[in-house]
Image (tube, rainbow, N blue to C red):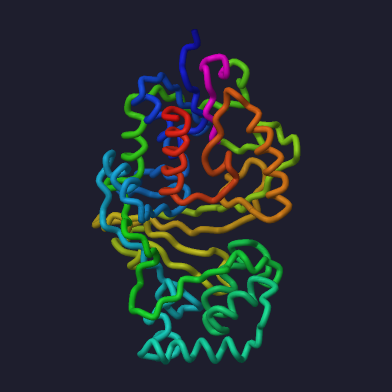
Amino acid sequence: MKQYDYLVVGAGLWGSVFAHEATKRGKKCLVIDRRNHIGGNVYCENVEGINVHKYGAHIFHTNDKDIWDYVNSFVEFNRYTNSPVANYNGELYNLPFNMNTFYQLWKVRTPEEAKEKIRQQVEEAGIKEPGNLEEQAISLVGTDIYKKLIKAYTEKQWGRKATELPAFIIKRLPVRFTFDNNYFNDRYQGIPIGGYNKLTEGLLKDVDVKLGVDFFKDKEALMTLAETIVYTGPIDEYFDFRFGQLEYRSLRFENQLLDVENYQGNAVVNYTDGETPFTRIIEHKHFEFGTQPKTVITHEYPQEWVKGAEPYYPVNDDKNTTVFNQYKALAAEETAVIFGGRLAEYRYYDMHQVVASALKKVKVHFDS
């Protein structure tokens, strides 16, 4: 008899949901993670009473009431609404693009005036078949919005010229002809009261967890502990990079504790000019309406991913998709390994999608 039914590799949201649901069904799970904390990229670090989103801002949003009720069963979520501000060379604009943005740009007051301004600029650009991201964006929102709020931000994010990026990246842009600064259209939105650690602690409350354990350093011994492996790490690493490394974009964060109560008045301010090297500043206390006497801000710098760096955004171009499909075929042949999550599936997931994916895998695995 094995010691556990499931060895879950990765204590992030996907692995935590799977382990919780398996434990609920009477199975014994061991969750391991090479980091020294649970929660994966949603982990929060407490600094001066402020929950600092250690791996970048995470805002939970969904239209799925079942998913919303599920996460709220572990911790109550607050009413935080994501309303970022764009700073272009000191000029401030509301995001997403809405009537506030259009008034700030052109002093137009009605939706018809705003639509006409965009229509004129799109017509003047004369782009019939967009061949890259720049042309696609201009054909959707005109030149002013593109130049001030899209071009440099996108180039910093991807590390490539907008003319070198494929059009599909920006097929749809959020454009609203209402005075609505809510970035997401989803019905449910918020941040866990007390931080995301409350959520993952609730999920793993009755589960054995070992931290600081590198699965690949002791793979053979660890795999003997359980009947089934649940793997949430990079799929190419699991197969020893047999077909080569999948590519990602990464991020670097610079945190500062400031002896001021309120630094920028908003949780998220994007810097959309080309001269500023970072893409945004996060002020974490505003996610939870904090009143602490100090504040923590984070400058976020996108960067090329290299082995050893944290992989954040998969580069889902044709080349990488071809490589991933080769790994996916290998994974399908594994009878005692379940693959799941953003790294194992090589796809960008919002948090509600991570939870939904894990619950779907649980349903297929246990209930079918």
- In the image, farthest residue toward the right: 243
Q: Quadrant of residue 18?
A: top left
Q: Quadrant of the C terminus?
A: top left
Q: Nearer the viewer, residue 74 or 258?
A: 74
Q: Give the percent coordinates (x, y) of residue 223.
A: 57, 19
Q: Give the percent coordinates (x, y) of residue 165.
A: 67, 66
Residue 241 magenta-drawn? no
Residue in the image at 55% along x and 78% along y: 140
Q: Nearer the viewer, residue 308 or 47?
A: 308
Residue span colored magenta: 222-232
Residue 299 as seen in the image, left or right of residue 223:
left
Residue in the image at 53% along x and 21% along y: 228
Up-down: is 166 above or below 29? below
Residue in the image at 68% along x and 45% along y: 246
Q: Give the percent coordinates (x, y) of residue 112.
A: 41, 90
Residue 331 as seen in the image, left or right of residue 270:
right
Up-down: is 52 above or below 177? above
- Number of numbered discs visible in the structure rendering: 0
Residue 223 magenta-drawn? yes
Q: Give the percent coordinates (x, y) of residue 64.
A: 35, 51
Residue 68 as seen in the image, left or right of residue 208:
left
- In the image, farthest residue toward the front: 368
Residue in the image at 57% along x and 84% along y: 143
